[in-house]
Image (cartoon, rainbow, N blue to C red):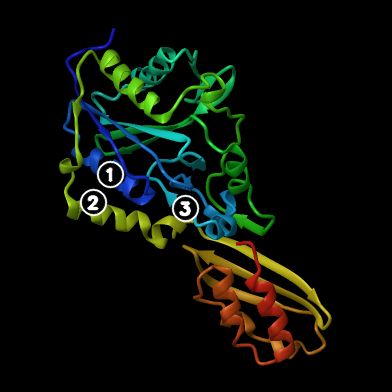
Amino acid sequence: MYANNIKTAVYIEPLTDPFHNLAAERYLLEHTPAGSVTLYLWQNKNTVVIGRNQNPWAECNMALLRKDGGHLVRRLSGGGAVYHDSGNLNFTFLTNTHTYNLSRQLSVITTALAALGIKAEKSGRNDILVDGRKVSGNAFYTAGCKKYHHGTLLIDVKTDVMAKYLTVSPLKLQAKGVSSVKSRVMNLKEACPALTADMLRTELVKAFGAVYGTTPKQLGADFFDAEEMARYEAEFRSDAYRLGKRLPFSWQTEARFSWGSFTLACQVDGGVITDAAVYTDAMDWQALAGAGKLFCGKPFTPQALALAAEGLACAELKNDIINHLANLAI
């Protein structure tokens, strides 16, 4: 059996801002005392969360997410892309190498679900399944002797919205990084129609105490240092971190107009175009000669590409190209 002399604590985050919530997770990792375990429960609003080594454009319909006012965030842990909304409850177990026990941590989840009448089982891929379908995916992070294990619990996620954001636009993109493995998922409300996030939170806290044989200490907002939290949040919010400086990729777009073809080929690193070339079979090919330099150093967004094309000299070509670039789904 498990040892019962481990100190435990619980923090339930009331906010749904993903950058704040990832900052709180990092803060708890840094400040959970050695030899103890903290359970963190949190929710994000309309957010795609990608793994540490993923290319966002290869995992998510960035243009649609941006258009809908959603958030793209990159977590510290590896693994695949997931979608969070108010129908999803997230959990994190924060501890160190001495007290980290994945089996025990997952038992908290399955014990809580059992109390709600839901028979769940751990799978070989560290997922949690109900009737053979995935209701929880898990990912892991280690920094020195500090470790965390976190995951999702699908209560009543809008799976149609999840599918449209996690379906990549048909771009000509060659990306480096880890790609997500799509799995069959189900909402827990299928197994327990009356289930709410509050009910599940309550059972998770009870199960945490039962599995660890202790009464968890309840942490409040005063546990966090505002200055340190602000630093972490700024890092998670920055484009340099979210878009991934270490994951360069190549991309191109093509279009045909009355005057001929237009191809823009780019190298993108950290959301910025580092190299670009323009190709055409137009009779007036000189109008696009050297045009690639207009796009170098520009952000990889439709608006920035269209604005860069304003530098083209030929009005006929320029207007067609601007309209094409401004309406790209990237």
133 horizontally vs 50: left or right: right
Question: Could you tell me how far apart the alpha carbons at marks 2 and 1 are, in whole angstroms?
Answer: 7 Å
For residue 306, the mark is: none
Check if mark 2's residue and mark 1's residue have beta carbons within 8 Å.
yes
Q: Nearer the viewer, residue 276 or 135?
A: 135
Q: Amino acid at mark 1?
A: Ala
Neighbourhood count class around disc 3 (C-alpha, 10 Å): few under 14, some 14–19, many 20 upward:
many
Residue 189, image x, y percentages: 53, 24
Quadrant (top left/top right/bottom left/bottom right) for the C terminus: bottom right
Neighbourhood count class around disc 2 (C-alpha, 10 Å): few under 14, some 14–19, many 20 upward:
some
Q: Nearer the viewer, residue 274 or 326?
A: 326
Q: Earlier in the sequence, mark 3 or mark 1?
A: 1
Residue pointed to by mark 3: 72
Residue 260, image x, y percentages: 81, 80
Q: Amino acid at mark 2?
A: Met
Badge 3 marks a residue whose secondary structure is strand
Q: Earlier in the sequence, mark 2 or mark 3?
A: 3
Question: Could you tell me how far apart the alpha carbons at marks 2 and 3 are, in whole angstroms?
Answer: 19 Å
Residue pointed to by mark 2: 229
Badge 1 marks a residue whose secondary structure is helix
Check if mark 2's residue and mark 3's residue have beta carbons within 8 Å.
no
